[in-house]
Amino acid sequence: MPPGYATGMADAVIFDVDGTLVDTNYLHAVCWWEAFRQHDHGVNMADVHRAIGMGSDKLLDHLLPGDRDSDADDDIRAAHRALYGVFWTRLRAFDGAADLLRACAGRGKKVVLASSASSGELAALRATLDADDAIAAATSSSEAGESKPAPDIVQVALERAEVEPERAVFVGDAVWDVHACRKAGVPCVGVLTGGIGEEALREAGAVAVYPDVADLLRQLDGSPLA
């Protein structure tokens, strides 16, 4: 247990979905890379991967030149959606993901999904998880004024859970999750399944880091989620 946290502090557990509960980050990276290529932008795959977790508006500004023709941005996003949509029926939840959601709900925690995905993508992710019985609420990109690393989506999740920041904990896989949580005043637990290393997550401010949600479930009693 990290210093300053005690068992039973959290009344709500907020989960990022892409890369945290469902194995999608590398699919997103490939689809963004191809969408950029189709619009004559050469972006290194490693740079695309490190940006996954941002909302699409922030991601384009982060990866593409500032003097680009931004009128094409909507077409790039549409290309990504079409490419990624091919995989919707083949998505895979990480081992232990649904069981972790149910374990948290079984302990009386409100389980909230806080995703930067569109409402359609979020529906596909929820179908993949198959754990709606444990989920109290969920947010999508349309409900946040500004995407991660801004805190908006975390704040919306807090409102849905009807808890104060200090009574919640967030689980995510990207430094953008950690930055958003810090701004919202919510401790963030990191997992490594999104492909971002432990050092980067801890430097961003993660209070604990686990290899994956299955390991977090095994150590649930001694974790910030308990």
Image (spheres, grey):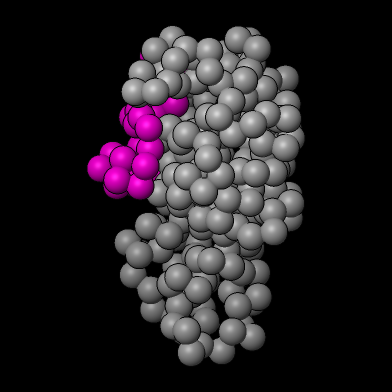
Q: Is residue 22 magenta?
A: no
In the picture, which quadrant includes the N terminus?
A: top left
Residue sitting at x 53%, y 40%:
185
- Left or right: 195, with 147 as reference point: left
Nearest the viewer among 195 and 87 is: 195
Position of residue 71 measured from the top left corner of the image (x, y, whole percent): 64, 86
Residue sitting at x 69%, y 44%:
156
- Left or right: 28, with 2 as reference point: right
Q: Write the start and end of the magenta stretch as one range.
A: 192-219
Position of residue 129 measured from the top left corner of the image (x, y, whole percent): 61, 30
Q: Is residue 154 above or below residue 161?
A: below
- Left or right: 138, with 154 as reference point: right
Q: Is residue 47 visible?
A: yes
Nearest the viewer among 96 and 182 is: 182
Nearest the viewer among 182 and 99 is: 182
Residue sitting at x 47%, y 84%:
66
Q: Is residue 57 above or below residue 212?
A: below
- Left or right: 45, with 111 as reference point: left
Q: Quadrant of residue 125?
A: top right
Q: Is residue 218 visible?
A: no
Residue sitting at x 57%, y 13%:
103
Position of residue 107 measured from the top left corner of the image (x, y, whole percent): 60, 10
Position of residue 162 measured from the top left corner of the image (x, y, whole percent): 73, 30
Q: Quadrant of residue 3?
A: top left
Q: Is residue 83 above or below residue 164?
A: below
Q: Is residue 3 above or below residue 80?
A: above
